Structures are given as C-alpha cells and as structure tokens.
Image (tube, helix red, strand yellow):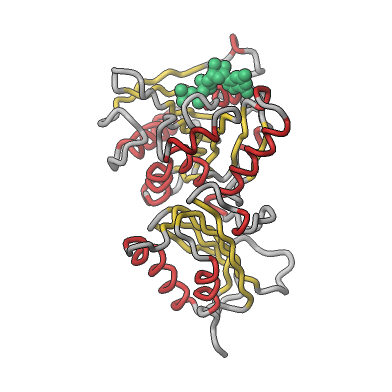
Amino acid sequence: MPVGVCVITGFLGSGKTTLVNYILKADHGYRIAVILNDFGAELGVEKMLVQQDGVDGDNASRTLVEDWVELNNGCVCCTVKGSLVQTIEGLLEKRKEMGEKFDFILLETTGLADPGPVARELWVDDELVEEDGAVLDSIVTLVDASNIEKQIEENKEATLQVAYADTILLNKADLVKAEDLERVKARIAAINAEAEIVVTTRSSVDLGIVLNQGTVAGGGCGRKPYAPASSVHNSDIRTVCIATSGFLDGESFQNWLEDLLWERRNAEGGADILRAKGLVYTAGSDKRRVLQAVREVYEITDGPVEENSDEVMNKLVFIGRNLDEDALAVGLKSCVARD
Ligand SMILES: Nc1nc2c(ncn2[C@@H]2O[C@H](COP(=O)(O)OP(=O)(O)OP(=O)(O)O)[C@@H](O)[C@H]2O)c(=O)[nH]1
C-alpha cells in the first residue's frame, strides 16, 4: 500500500507550522514524516522530522530522526520535476532499509506557493505510486480568518490555495467576531464550495479530518451540499457542480473532457479549470468511476463500491475561472450514451 501524502498549504502566517507541530505532538500513534519547506533558509535544504511509533505524547520521550536532504532547487514548491519526488523516494527508501514504514507523509508548502504543481507532481509520478510508494491523499489549506479577505484580493496564490483544497481549516477564529467569521466562511465557500471547512484556533483539529482522507485518490464528489454558482460574485475563481443521469459513452466523455481541459484552456475566454472531481457511470460497466483532474492532468479510475446503486447519476465538480455552468451541463448531457 502506498503511503498517503497530505499537502499542507495556506498563505503566509496562516498556521501551517502550528498545525504540523500540533500533529507531531498529538498522541495518535501514527508514524508521520514531515517535509518542511524551509524556504527562508539560505542553506537550500529541507529538514525532515520523522516521528516514530510508540510515543506517549511526551515530547521528551519522542524520537525525532533529523535528516537534511539537499534539493536541487531549494524549494519543494518549484515546478522543477524531480526534487520533490526524489526527496520522498529517498525518505521511503531509508525507512525501508530500517524495516519500518510510514503511515503518512505531511508536506508543508511555503505560504506563497501555488499548490497545483506540487499536487500534480505527486499525483502523476507513477514511480512514486508503485508498491510501498507514496500517493497524494489530500490537500489541506490553512486560512487566516482575520486576513484572508485581503489576501484573496491581493494575492492570486491565496485564492489558488483555497481553490485547490480538499479540506480548509478556517484558523485564527479567536481573532474574529462570530459575524465576521460567517462572512469569511461564505467568501471561501464561494471560491471552493466542495471543500470541507472546519473552524479552528491554533490549528487544533481532529486528526481524522486531516489524515487519511483519500480525497484525491478516492473522489470527493457529493460530500457537501453545493453552493449555487449564482451565489458567487466576489472572486473570479468559482465552483460549478453539474449532474446528469444515465450511462455516459466513455469515449464521448473523454473527448469532451480533453477538449475542456486541454483545448479550451488556451482559447480566448475559455474555461480555466484548476481542479475537477466527479463520479460517473460509463456504458458497459456497472462500476462507478472516479474522475480526478488537476489542471490539464486527469485520470479516471474505478470508484468505491456503491451502497445504493439504483441511481445512475453522474456528478462533476469544477473549480476554476470562466466557468459557464449551462454550457458545462449541456456538454455533459451530450455524452450520455444512446441506446
Ligand atoms: N491568535 C492566534 N494565533 C495563531 C493561531 N494559529 C497560529 N497562530 C500564530 O500565528 C503565527 C503564525 O503561525 P505559523 O504556524 O508559523 O504560520 P505559517 O502558516 O506556518 O507561517 P509561514 O511559514 O510564514 O507561512 C504564530 O505566531 C502562531 O503562534 C490562532 O488560531 N490564533
């Protein structure tokens, strides 16, 4: 079984390190490797702290294996292929030599990072996913409740971090009034209606919410009621959810998707899809299938077994810019197989 990688992102000062420290101190018994993105350091290295099994929550008794791994570019969030993957491979290899395995890998990005390239790199690297490798589990975004509105206005990365999230920790709740918190929550949901939003202070969160989500690998469609697209105005990145019933023609669906993800992205005013997830049924198979896409990279895999399989309903979620909900709905419908 590959190890799940949880990408922890969020704007500068939102509480990422606080979350990592919280996870490392919590008494959960998991073996977790943390890859810290030491962006500020001039050394050009990443520091890895490995929490070993069997700790009792007391810091003094914790064994921390410290390791310094030189990366070619000094930053795990850079788009240069190789460094991040090599780091994780090296980490996994080392643990294998020691006869141990990780339960999870946490990857903390820098506050100014666009998590898209990191997610894509983890996701598409087949060598990583092989047996005993690593696979992207989920993207957790920390949001500073007291500053996010301004950050979204001023920084595209802050918006992208919200857009890519599977789970959003609306942190620093102690610094804002209840009514402000509701407004901020609505603003975030307007960018990403699909992510679960959890209000936190000092990044204290039930670890079950952060670890082992399987959201990226297993599909997250339909976890939450969707905000209607018409309720979205404040940001040019928004979420659109569409659904249509009946088995899809697999080839038509794939062609439609590739046109959306590959061709129209480059067209003037075309939809710029950052993230797509969905559950679809294709003719010839009674299995539900999971669509996952991060920008132009996508995959369709067999989905989890469904309890109530009477309903053949295809559901897709798109997060991005210039999304035309009606056109998307018509496009999906046109992929339904004719008898
Ligand atoms: N009041 C308050 N302060 C918090 C909370 N969470 C974190 N902080 C503080 O905010 C500061 C920044 O937190 P960090 O965890 O370092 O944030 P970060 O996202 O890792 O920051 P960068 O690495 O700069 O991107 C620290 O002083 C934390 O103690 C919170 O919920 N409430």
Against 29, is 130 above or below? below
Q: Position of residue 124 (x, y in %)?
A: 39, 51
Residue found 29% across the figure and 22% down from its top: 44
Residue 301 seen in render: yes
Against 281, is 338 above or below? below
Residue found 62% across the figure and 60% down from its top: 304
Residue found 45% across the figure and 59% down from its top: 322
Given residues 6 and 331, the one toward you in this image is 331
Q: With 156 as the anchor, is 202 left or right in this view?
A: right
Residue 101 seen in render: no
Given residues 35 and 88, the one toward you in this image is 35
Q: With 273 as the anchor, is 174 left or right in this view?
A: right
| Number of residue marks | 0
Q: With 228 as the anchor, is 119 left or right in this view?
A: left
Locate the C terminus by quadrant: bottom right
- Among the 4 quarters of the image, the one containing residue 317: bottom right
- Among the 4 quarters of the image, the one containing residue 57: top right
Give the residue at the far front of this rendering. Answer: 233
